[in-house]
Image: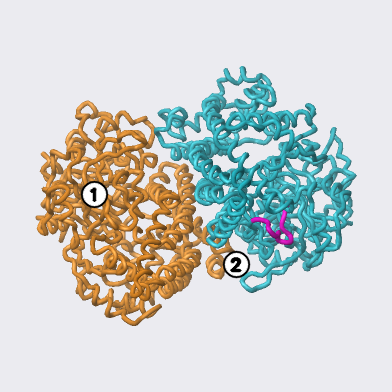
Chain colours: A cyan, B orange
Amino acid sequence: MRHLLTVLLLLPVTLSAEEGMWTYNNFPSVAVQQKYGFTPTQNWLDKVRLSTVRLAQGCSASFVSPNGLVMTNHHCVSTCVQQLSTKEKNIHADGFYARQASEEKRCPDLEVNQLVEISTVTSRITKAVTGKSGEAYTKALNAEKAAIEEECAKGDDNTRCDVVSLYNGGVFDLYKYRRYQDVRLVFVPEFRIAFFGGDPDNFMFPRYDLDLGMVRVYDKGQPLPTPNHLKWSKAGTKEGELTFVAGNPGSTERLKTISELEYVRDFQLPNRLFSLYEFRGMLWQFQQRGEEQKRISNDDLFSVENSIKALKGEYEALVDKRFFAQKVDAERDLRKRVAANPKWQAEYGKVWDQVAQAMESQRAMYRKHTPLVRLARSELYQIAFTLVRATQELGKPGPERLPGYGDAALPQLKQGLFSEAPIHKEFEIEKLAQSLEKLREMLGPDDQAVKKILGKQSPREVAEKLVAGTSLETVASRKKLFDGGWSTVESSQDTMIAFARLVEPIERAYLLQEQKEIEPVLTRAGEALSKIRFAVFGSTVYPDATFSPRISYGSVQGWMENGRKIGPYTILGGAFERATGADPFRLPDSWLQKKDQLSLTTPFNFVTTNDIIGGNSGSPVFNRNAEVVGLIFDGNIHSLGGAFGFDEKMNRSVAVDSRGITETLTKIYGAERILKEIGAQ
Amino acid sequence: MRHLLTVLLLLPVTLSAEEGMWTYNNFPSVAVQQKYGFTPTQNWLDKVRLSTVRLAQGCSASFVSPNGLVMTNHHCVSTCVQQLSTKEKNIHADGFYARQASEEKRCPDLEVNQLVEISTVTSRITKAVTGKSGEAYTKALNAEKAAIEEECAKGDDNTRCDVVSLYNGGVFDLYKYRRYQDVRLVFVPEFRIAFFGGDPDNFMFPRYDLDLGMVRVYDKGQPLPTPNHLKWSKAGTKEGELTFVAGNPGSTERLKTISELEYVRDFQLPNRLFSLYEFRGMLWQFQQRGEEQKRISNDDLFSVENSIKALKGEYEALVDKRFFAQKVDAERDLRKRVAANPKWQAEYGKVWDQVAQAMESQRAMYRKHTPLVRLARSELYQIAFTLVRATQELGKPGPERLPGYGDAALPQLKQGLFSEAPIHKEFEIEKLAQSLEKLREMLGPDDQAVKKILGKQSPREVAEKLVAGTSLETVASRKKLFDGGWSTVESSQDTMIAFARLVEPIERAYLLQEQKEIEPVLTRAGEALSKIRFAVFGSTVYPDATFSPRISYGSVQGWMENGRKIGPYTILGGAFERATGADPFRLPDSWLQKKDQLSLTTPFNFVTTNDIIGGNSGSPVFNRNAEVVGLIFDGNIHSLGGAFGFDEKMNRSVAVDSRGITETLTKIYGAERILKEIGAQ
């Protein structure tokens, strides 16, 4: 689940005690010492950083053995699990356990990133963009980033270098990762228990989920040695105990201005939700075609339901009048402080209005651009588009390429492009037909792009022809096109490639316009706002989340809900009490059969005050000894507004308890090999 | 289409020239005289009132011959057209024309209301509620309304009496209608031309639709004599010519307070849209099951797409910052005026805060209540629910019954209940399963109502069992239950009835709570606000729309769009130019075949400045001689915010031109009988 945390942080004049997704080079060890009597040393922080990883597709994970064994969530590897499932052997439904190393199965698309070094490149970036504005600014910024990343990676595909913009452009750091693409599936339980309670219980607590996925990183065909890893805690936690969470929170908007938040509230979020709800209605009905259709669309349905619940929670935080009024007050206060200082006023006074104006342009752009982007719900289209764009971009020097096509991104791009994951044409037609219809709806039938794309045909006719006339479902034809470069792609007769050739320049024009008119204003403004904040509040500020490694501290704690205390733990027995026999409240047969052998009072799930957000899925929860006590898989319902502010009273992260994992791996799954390896036996 | 008109009316300090949906007892004849040199006399107004009718299901129409022939929109009778269609003979697709009287086919559910008398009952209502508040207030109000309506109708099913609350409770008028339920289909063209351009062109202009439906009112088995009817204009209009529109605008919210508008903007509208988008996604995919499934779900899909487009337009008006700021300013101004007058302040000063508080409760109630109401997307459930509630309510004296179950509403209720319209069980299951799943999603799996309704089963299991075990698809079993009264319904073993017995008391509890906590506050506040407005602005105010007969004036006029003039007329030839051959831009074969015989320069559709809104569909456009010059079927895109305010510069009503109707009935449909009858030949 995307973990989204709630409400109430405004400007960090005084930070909520547990608030913050801290970078490894600015961790508030003193504050932890003051509250919990434990000082995370630099050594300790380095070990944690190297023991935890990012899944490039959007999750977090950790090494839990010396042999490259990785713990994450089932829902973080569910795409792989779907891809390895077949009509005959549905491991998504039935679970998977490699009883011996040779049974571990390679995941087509997984990439693991381990952060090995952070350095600051702010001054280099600043120098490169000084005196520039508009398109020239964006170009210079992107070129300098690309140059830094290229220098860092030195053409080594096993190294990934990202220039990360922190504090909305106030600080630029270079993150150097070790990259691994040979990742193999070791264990997942049945979907029914990984996601027990389904969408209704998603983002809720009390909770009873074994949202666990184990994979292993291989290097040169052998399990990767991982001296830096987290040990296993058999003892687990006690209520009130200090906990850390290390992972990759995806994105927060806590530092955004009011005009940006209004854009999100009144335009971006509702429109995303409209689109997602309609897509979900379609998927829900598509699943009724039969068992096979259900299987092939499960992953999309899960993802869309999860997004809806998360975004709806964000939306409800923003339409909460009291919450928004606080945000408005905080901005008014900051603007007053700036206005009271003539130097500040001269330098920064106009920044809010500039952002507001950029948001107006953004709105117009979104309407034009987004329907084109949503065509990529079709995988075949997405592949075709990537081929058309990548072969053009790769013909240019790195610094001149569009973002996402630099050398740093290439291995991940290729992995996706050449993935052996099966593509289902029947499903592709539905997704493409719907996206094309929405395209016409949003742009109108008289729009030039729509006329080019649909001609005199209906969206469905176009979708059917495109899918019928493409051979992109085979990796070989993709490879041929990619290796042939733009000249091969340009002359290809493949229907989907031809279609992507038609759409790509239209999409590119919007992208370039955004880069010219909106990005420079927002980056400049972000930089200015960040300077204002440092000037006014000092350096006790953490940056908004950027899907790069962060660490947060907190403790095991329930919360008060309408005057009633919600305790921090659930137990295994609770799952049996909640079960109804009908999905999504149906337990797997393995659980029903082994119920008698389980110690039903074993802690199963628990909550902590750690500040997390979507992207933290799969993060380990660990104690001061760097021992795994849990596995983050969700946030509570109150956490959903956390995109905009953190409320320590109500926001909770939701984790699987290490004791629940040990008990079920032992008694239900007989996963001896794993238990021994992690030292849980 | 629901006709929704746009932006910019705030408080009517100075009315936009053409703004207003006027009641027949407060028409601004002087203003019309001043601008157009024509004074509508009382005689003229009476004739118009008697020549125009309301379709009780939600549209407007007019008598266009002395023999009960009624002109309205195709989309106003499309439910009937669907119901009369079969797998073998799909008149929805192919159109229908009764070449002789005996071929006219009865519509199962249509009810026509002709307004024969208006009288004011404000003082009687005021007297009944004086000194009462909360539940007692609502009960007294409803009881007095019911008593007035009963006295008026005197038990005659052919008379319908409605107490209409105008100016949000400032004025109560009694509307007495003659009711007709024997309504027969005479003519509809093919769906393809009735709704040419489909959803993409809905609410757009230029436009090319023959959205025409002709029915005939019968009385005692014979065509109803209608001496009061509108004559046909062969000449049509000229640009700038004075036009009137008489019809039944459904609902506007131009007089609402800011807290009410915020509720609509941040809560009600987005949540309705979320639900509609998801329903639409489901329907869209359901249509892919096959031709038959497409046929049976077309009406639902049309309705949901139309709602989405209309509500999205309303939503966009409300999230327009400038528009909303004007509303805020206007309210601030009014509050200042009240505060400046100590007597007013004492009497009315608190009303805005009271409304704001009621809106908070409304929000909580909506979350609980709405998912139950949406179960009625299933027709079988709706029938069961009506049987359960109606048989209980009918056992009570009229004034004690819930609204909607008074004697005035009975004939319409029975017509729906005993409708011979076919019900499709396969489709019913899908709609019910989705609604049940949404119920669980909105209330949560731990909600008591959800537990009662679903038990240990999945939403789909419940839906399948309910539909399998009911016999309510036959009118005979409904009649038996209805005639047997509550004791029969109470002991019925029919699954759907049993289910409705479970849900009905839960739904009733919410309804009663609303009646107790919210309605009295809003009605009292509406009354107070209306008094304030009369005091401040005098009586040149028209009430918000209430789906009761109104008349508006305006003229044939295009508008300026981004500096470009949109002319007021389209011509028949334009439809052929716009056609692509693929739905919804495919013309019917009859048109393609007869193209050469058509005079392609004949005006087809046109726009006027008349102030209309959803409910006006099917309204005649007529000139000062009370001759039909057009047929309203839509509003332009700018008109969509008209729910909250009218902008004469941009808002346009969209109509079929009488000349386009004459030309196509003559050349394409050879509808001699109709042409003669309306005097168009």
Q: How many marks?
A: 2
**Residue B32 place in picture, x, y as percent:** 17, 51
Q: Chain of mark 2?
A: B
Front one among B88 and B455: B455
Residue drawn at 46 percent across, 69 percent down: B357
Please, what is the dominant secondary structure of the magenta stretch?
loop
Looking at the rendered image, the quarter that the C terminus of chain B falls into is top left
Element marked by disc 1: strand
**Residue B117 place in picture, x, y as percent:** 17, 65
Residue range highlighted in magenta: A11-21
**Residue A386 place in picture, x, y as percent:** 62, 29
Q: Is residue B108 visible?
A: no
Does the magenta portion include B672? no
Q: Is residue A127 visible?
A: yes
Answer with mark 2 or mark 1, whichever residue precedes in sequence: 1
**Residue type, mark 2 in image:** Asp
Q: Which mark is residue B72?
A: 1
Q: Which mark is residue A606?
A: none
